[in-house]
Image: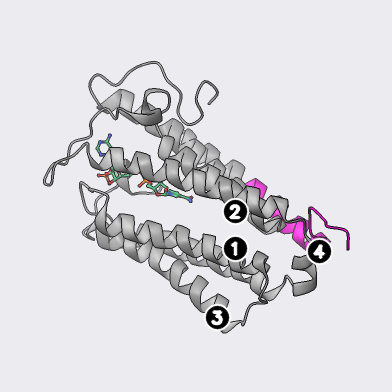
């Protein structure tokens, strides 16, 4: 059988993809222009919810839904389905563990933002489950070329490594009770304001390459748009609020953006 790079899509698939591209542009513009920021971290607007708890509430439902989805739907047993499930669950398990044990948060955040982001990630988990476990049959999965699955997995793991390494650097900027924002140094922080976002984007690019589903490419572009806009806003925030933050350096991609 001849191996395909892509699956075959209908008009509805292309419609959803076009809509997600529009969303990507809007969230990029909102975060970049300071017109609207999701209210956590540097942009929190009050709230009483412990951020460690909030971040767990944000990420855990997507992890639970992906595990339930994979086993409850009795997903087809192919390498494609297995690797995609493991990569997706790994991503959200890592974020839950980092939220619980790694990050040092400064202040609490609000319930509204927490629930909104949690619902968005849950929607991504349901879409992921639908696109792979419910829609992609054994025959379709086995008609796909294997190279993008393995190359995508390597890119995914590389992105996760970059992301984790810079989270580790951020954690070590603060002592146990410290709430101050410092100038991050080490890794790619000398070149960009948010190398951890770059790692996240690389990981999602790897996932999209593994998946080859149009909706996952759409989700990738939304994440790219959001994190690129947020990184530009963060660099501006650092320059305004953190003494000695360097004037040179990019926001997200070394020498480019
Ligand atoms: N897929 C997506 O769409 C998406 C979107 C957003 C985030 N994420 C994931 O979540 C991760 C964290 O995102 P985030 O937006 O919360 O990152 P962030 O604002 O950079 O914060 C990460 C952690 O580092 C601390 N921190 C940040 N800058 C610091 C500084 N200059 N000095 C000392 N501590 C500092 C933060 O404390 P405070 O909480 O006190 O600020 C927080 O504990 C990302 O890297 C990514 O993996 C994914």
Could you give the CA–CA distance between mark 2 and mark 4, rounded to whole angstroms? 18 Å
Of helix, strand and loop, which one carries label 1? helix
Q: Residue 68: image x %, image y %?
A: 50, 78
**For the residues bearing labels 3 and 2, Cβ distance under 8 angstroms:** no
Which residue is at the far right? Answer: 1
Disc 4: which residue: 143
Residue 36 seen in this snapshot: no
Residue of label 1: 84
Residue drawn 20% across the image and 46% down it? 106
Disc 2 designates what residue?
207
Q: Considering only order in the chain, which callout, 1 or 2, is on the residue closer to the N terminus?
A: 1
Q: Are marks 2 and 1 in contact (CB under 8 Å)?
A: yes
Disc 1 + disc 3, Cβ < 8 Å: no
For the residues bearing labels 4 and 1, Cβ distance under 8 angstroms:
no
Point out the stretch of residues depicted in magenta: 1-22
Along the polypeptide, which appears first: circle 3 or circle 4? 3
Residue on which the image places disc 3: 71
Foreground residue among 80 and 53: 80
Q: Residues within 10 Å of mark 2 (few under 14, many from 20)?
A: many
- Ligand 1 within 8 angstroms of badge 4 C-beta: no
User: As displayed, is residue 139 above or below residue 224?
Assistant: below
């Amino acid at each position: 059988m001849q191996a395909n790079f892509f699956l075959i899509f209908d008009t509805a698939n292309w419609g959803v993809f076009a809509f997600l591209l529009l969303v990507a542009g809007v969230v990029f513009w909102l975060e970049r222009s300071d017109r609207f920021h999701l209210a956590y971290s540097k942009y929190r607007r009050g709230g009483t919810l412990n951020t460690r708890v909030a971040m767990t509430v944000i990420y855990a439902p997507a992890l639970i839904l992906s595990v339930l989805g994979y086993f409850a739907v009795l997903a087809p047993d192919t390498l494609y389905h297995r690797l995609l499930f493991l990569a997706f669950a790994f991503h959200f398990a890592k974020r839950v563990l980092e939220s619980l044990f790694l990050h040092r948060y400064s202040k609490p955040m609000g319930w509204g933002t927490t629930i909104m982001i949690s619902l968005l990630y849950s929607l991504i988990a349901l879409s992921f489950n639908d696109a792979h476990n419910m829609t992609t049959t054994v025959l379709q999965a086995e008609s796909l070329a294997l190279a993008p699955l393995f190359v995508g997995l390597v890119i995914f793991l590389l992105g996760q490594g970059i992301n984790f390494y810079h989270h580790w650097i951020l954690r070590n900027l603060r002592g146990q009770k410290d709430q101050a924002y410092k100038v991050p140094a080490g890794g790619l922080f000398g070149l960009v304001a948010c190398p951890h976002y770059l790692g996240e984007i690389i990981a999602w690019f790897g996932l999209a390459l593994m998946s080859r589903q149009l909706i996952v490419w759409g989700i990738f572009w939304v994440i790219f748009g959001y994190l690129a806009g947020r990184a530009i806003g963060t660099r501006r925030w650092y320059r305004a609020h953190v003494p000695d933050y360097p004037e040179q350096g990019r926001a997200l991609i070394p020498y480019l953006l």
